[in-house]
Amino acid sequence: MASASTAVRSDPVTYDIDFSVVVTPPYHTKTLKVWLPLPPSDDGQDVTAGELSAFPTAVKPKVAKEPVHGNTFAYFEFDHPEGAQIIRHRFRVKAWQLRWNVEPSRVTAVKD
């Protein structure tokens, strides 16, 4: 990824993330709709796509990017869910320490 910032990246660390969400719909829910935001890659982190799953009802999500801000979401739709639904997102993140090397003499104080 080409860097748009002036920060210097160093000391990368890789994390394996296992993120779970439990959603309990009200009794006799006809349709449960869940939007799960997905983390982006940027100058400070590189996100490797992983696996999205649901349990006990196996639902395949639709993944889409919204046009205004470019955020990515996974959309799950459960038909007549019975009890709690677990949504699991497993992925990998490589994150860097960002050093901005700001010159104190170039910092301007804001008065208003």
Image (cartoon, rainbow, N blue to C red):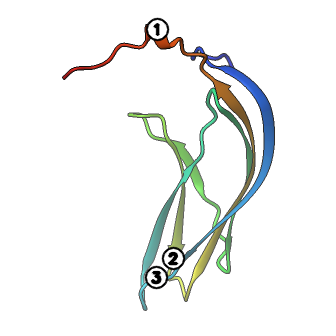
Q: Secondary structure at mark 3?
A: loop
CB within 8 Å, label 1 to label 2: no
Which of pointers 1 and 2 indicates the residue nearer the eye? 1
- Per the image, the residue denoted by label 3 is 25
Q: Residue at x 22, y 20 (%)?
A: 111
Task: Work out whether residue 70 or residue 99 is closer to the camera in this orientation and state it.
Answer: 99
- Per the image, the residue denoted by label 2 is 79
Q: Secondary structure at mark 1?
A: helix
Residue 110 place in picture, x, y as percent: 27, 20
Residue 64 place in picture, x, y as percent: 53, 44
The single residue placed furthest to the left in the displayed view is 112
Q: Residue at x 46, y 73 (%)?
A: 32
Q: Quadrant of residue 10?
A: top right
Q: Mark 2, residues whose alpha carbon is within 10 Å: few (<14), some, or many (≥20)?
A: few
Q: Mark 3, residues whose alpha carbon is within 10 Å: few (<14), some, or many (≥20)?
A: some
User: Which tag, 2 or 3, sits closer to the chain's start?
Assistant: 3
Which of pointers 2 and 3 indicates the residue nearer the eye? 3
Task: Work out whether residue 106 or residue 64 is closer to the camera in this orientation and state it.
Answer: 106
Residue 15 place in picture, x, y as percent: 78, 49
Task: Examine the rendered structure and indicate whether residue 102 appears above or below residue 31.
Answer: above
